[in-house]
Amino acid sequence: MKPISVRLKIPAALLTLLLATLLTTRLPAEDRLRVETLPNGVRLALEPNQLDSFVAFTMQVQTGPDLVPADRAAGEIVAHALFYGSSNRSFEDVSASVSQVGGSLTTRRTADSVTVTCVTGPRHWREAAYLLCEALKNADFTPEALARARADIGRLDARRAVSPFLSAYNALVERTQGLIEPDPSTMDRVNPESARAYFQTRYLPSRVVFAAAGHFDSLAVMSALENMLFDFDRRAPGRASPPSAPQEPSDAPLRVPAAGDAAYALIGTQGPRAGEELYPAFVVLRTLLGGGHGSRLFRRVRESEGFGYTVGTASDPLAGGPLVAYVGWNSRRSEQDPAVADKALRRLGGQLDAVLSEPPGEEELDRARKLAAGQWTIERELPAERAEALAWSASMATAAYDRSLPGLFLRVSRDDVIRAARTYTSRRISAVALPPRLSH
């Protein structure tokens, strides 16, 4: 399950104006970023703003990569079962707590992390914090909890299956990150003992970041979290897991069945982690290729070649995911030859190659820099978005890294973009989502 960042369709000139306003806005003196590390290793990143109407808490756990299908299955089920009862609270009690804080509780699982975000009103912040801390410390994986988690996963898979783009995108991301999808029988073999073993060895204090953004008092929240987590003292296993190896590139694209007439071609590349030297240049490169109607993919594939009704790039920047370039077309209104998918992949690959053979000029690069900075800033306006970004920054680099990125984007040079393209776009994996009549 790999979420996709949503890119707003806002003109670059307007984004530049908004960016200038946002970057020059200063929070009141009492509303400053506070970063602490508790004695048990849990990191806290708190950024209050009394002008907000809500408060958002994000709990992020760096679970590490799952190298075998059994671990992947256990990790999926554990992430979905965190709020289905604990050793201190029944399922009904936890459900009542979720309702009390407003019912806004979301869980995102990536290749090596789990992120839970709860949004509530300022009066209920303490219950929201306790809800997350209790799950982190004492989640209880009873057979009933695992059954509810499996049902949740089944519903998510069913929703994804009806979208050819999401199906192909997720398959591509999993392949580029070296993930091994567990089959249904492996999911069924996850029992309370294996779920608890995964939980006890992966959900560790040194891997946890708590972040909060919105309308709250920093000292009160920091004191409450310290008290709620004082007995969270799990120890790391003796040996850390090695990183997951990316899938070797293949000439044969992944093939995903698509219902209806929509068809898609996608190419994925590896990307840098947050905090790495070329991360800002990589984001600008992604924007240059697929950010809006002025991007290379839109201008050169849709406008110049007249192919496709949707084209661009997709990624999940908070998960360190790959860059995915894509084009979608109506298989009945365009060429019905199955080879159209191969042609679409060549069109996408050609534009990835062209970054090196036809490097961007200053005007094109300036547009990409400003658009990347503007989008990054605007997409973090709400408390939930800011809390997730804080947790991501604190776990990957420093808590202030996210807020520094718009300025870093504006300083990306032409040579930086070329280096990012040369470093990350040579290893590619492709996927196509085709209706049955074109998939043979």
Image (cartoon, rainbow, N blue to C red):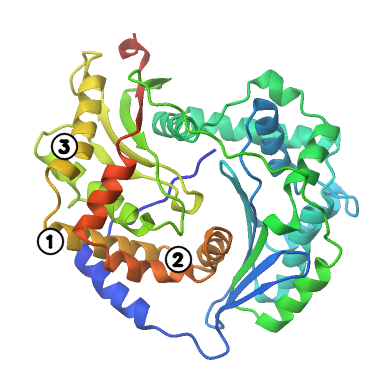
Q: CA distance from mark 2 to mark 1?
A: 27 Å
Mark 3 lies on residue: 301
Q: Residue at x 77, y 54 (%)?
A: 136
Give how far across and how far down residue 193 sits, in percent.
Answer: 85, 33
Mark 2 lies on residue: 380
Which residue sits furthest right? 88
Q: CA distance from mark 3 to mark 2?
A: 30 Å
Q: Are marks 2 and 1 in contact (CB under 8 Å)?
A: no
Compared to residue 21, the image places residue 8 above or below, namely above
Q: Give SS at disc 3.
A: helix
* Of the pair 46 and 405, the residue shown nearer to us: 405
Mark 1 lies on residue: 362
Is 422 on the left or on the right of 101, as rendered? Answer: left
Mark 2 vs mark 1, foreground winner is 1
Quadrant of the drawing holding the N terminus? top right
Snapshot quadrant of residue 143: top right
